[in-house]
Amino acid sequence: MSSQKAAFRLVADELPLTVWTSGPDGIPTYHNRHWHETFGQNADYAEICHPDDMDGVAKSWEACLRSGLPYKYIARFRLPDGTYRALMTHAHPFYADDGSIAYWVGSSTELPDAKTHHLRLIA
């Protein structure tokens, strides 16, 4: 692992929010410590995203992967105890020298319980 990548992971693991990276295809390549502590070591987005939110999450993410535009979405994710929390997720592409997307870096911030309650009511 390069020293730059090691430094990124060191910082990301200390943040009180989830940080992740994915390849240009959108497949996750890294989740920070907060992700693993919050959702579990092998948590998969499709398994923990609220069923009512998954279609919108997937369509929005796929559109960003095609366009290269930044991603922003609010969705509910299941915690190990079975409750859901609303997360605001942002992701930005990083480009290779040839102009293609090299990878994505994203973060997810937990929203207050009021937002989670609101999403439950409108679902």
Image: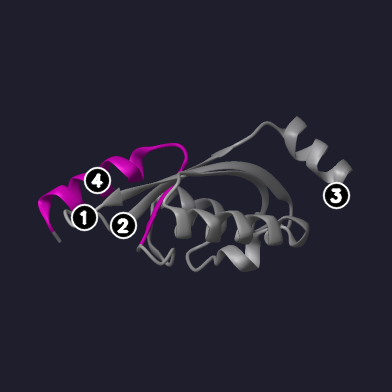
Circle 4: element type: helix
| Separation of residues labelled 4 and 2 (CA atoms) | 19 Å
The magenta-colored residue range is: 2-22
Q: Residues within 10 Å of mark 2 (few under 14, many from 20)?
A: some
Circles 2, 1 touching at the beta carbon (< 8 Å): yes
- CB-based contact (under 8 Å), mark 1 and mark 3: no
Q: Which mark is residue 117?
A: none
Sequence-first tag of 1 and 3: 1
Q: Which residue is mark 4?
A: 8
Residue 27's x, y, as percent? Answer: 43, 67
Q: Amino acid at mark 3?
A: Ala
Judged from the image, the secondary structure of the residue bearing numbered disc 1 is loop
Question: Residue under circle 2?
Answer: 101
Mark 1 near mark 4, Cβ–Cβ under 8 Å? no
Answer few, some or many: residues within 10 Å of disc 3's Cα (few below 14, many 20 plus, some between 14 and 19): few
In the rendered view, does 54 fall on the left or right side of 15? right
Tell me the SS state at disc 2. Answer: strand
Tag 4–tag 3 contact (CB < 8 Å): no
Distance in Å between CA atoms under marks 1 and 3: 40 Å
Q: Residue at x 78, y 58 (%)?
A: 52
Q: Nearer the viewer, mark 2 or mark 3?
A: 2
**Distance of mark 1 from mark 4, alpha carbons?**
18 Å
Name the residue located 61 percent from the left edge and 43 percent from the top edge.
87
Q: Which residue is mark 3?
A: 123
Q: Quadrant of residue 70?
A: top left
Q: Indicate which disc, 4 or 2, sits on the residue closer to the N terminus.
A: 4
Q: Where residue 33 appears, x then y in whole percent?
A: 40, 51
Looking at numbered disc 4 in the image, what kind of residue is underneath it? Answer: Phe
Q: Nearer the viewer, mark 1 or mark 3?
A: 1
